[in-house]
């Protein structure tokens, strides 16, 4: 399961590597960054990494693939909701039989591990 996740596949160390940059923090970085030359600002020759707080194309690709893999649309119904709709809301007696079966299996399992497995081959006391 973990071998297929994006975190292990890309060699990232935490989910923080996938979270997009904070726009406010990036703006503060730009304001506090050393002032570039007026000629570079006027001609627009600043590098994209300098303005966006060192966001490279590799980082951007990781962020895009992360957001592409997030499920879109409404969440699927939970298993408890489908069980309730199928058996409880329809007034079926099946849940009662399932409960009795679960108690029988659970009771036998407890009895086996507490008593029966120690006396299978020996005389019962």
Image (cartoon, rainbow, N blue to C red):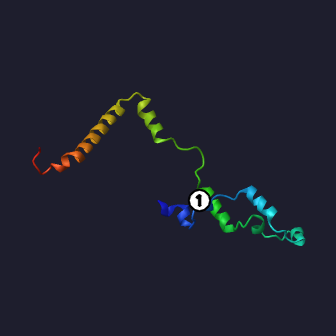
**Where does the C terminus fall, quadrant-wise?**
top left
Is 61 rendered above or below residue 98?
Answer: below
- Residue that sits furthest to the front in the current view: 125
For the point 90% across and 70% down, the residue is: 38
Seen in the picture, residue 71 relative to 37 is either above or below; the reply is above
Q: Please provide percent x and percent y for residue 107.
A: 27, 40
Q: Can you say whether 125 is above or below 16 in the image?
A: above
**Number of numbered discs overlaid on the protein picture:** 1
- Per the image, label 1 sits on a secondary structure element best described as helix
Q: How busy is the neighbourhood of tag 1: few (under 14 within 10 Å), some, or many (20 plus)? A: few
Could you say where residue 88 lies in the image, as x and y percent from the top left? 42, 31
Foreground of the two, 56 or 73? 56
Residue 119 shown left or right of residue 12 in the figure: left
Question: What residue sits 31% from the left and 39% below the top?
Answer: 102
Residue linked to disc 1? 15
Expressed as whole percent of the image width and height from the top left, the position of residue 53 reads: 74, 65
Q: Where is residue 75 in the image (x, y as percent from the top left)?
A: 55, 44
Is residue 65 shown to the viewer in this render? no
Res. 104 in view: yes
Nearest to the observer: residue 60 or residue 68: 60
Taking the image as shown, residue 87 lies to the left or right of residue 122, namely right
- Furthest residue in direction left, as rendered: 123
Q: Look at 57% across and 65% down and name the residue there.
A: 13
In terms of depth relative to the viewer, which is nearer, 47 or 112? 112
Q: In this view, does 45 lie to the left or right of 53?
A: right
Q: Which residue does the image show at 50% across and 62% down from the upper left?
A: 4
């Amino acid at each position: 399961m973990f071998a297929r996740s994006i975190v292990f596949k890309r060699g990232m160390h935490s989910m923080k590597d996938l979270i997009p940059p904070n726009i406010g923090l990036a703006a503060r970085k730009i304001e506090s960054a050393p002032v570039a030359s007026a000629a570079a600002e006027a001609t627009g020759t600043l590098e994209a990494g300098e303005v966006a707080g060192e966001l490279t194309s590799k980082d951007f690709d990781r962020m895009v693939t992360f957001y592409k893999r997030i499920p879109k649309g409404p969440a699927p119904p939970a298993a408890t909701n489908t069980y309730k709709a199928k058996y409880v809301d329809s007034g079926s007696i099946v849940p009662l039989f399932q409960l009795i079966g679960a108690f029988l299996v659970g009771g036998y399992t407890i009895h086996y591990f507490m008593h029966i497995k120690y006396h299978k081959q020996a005389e019962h006391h």
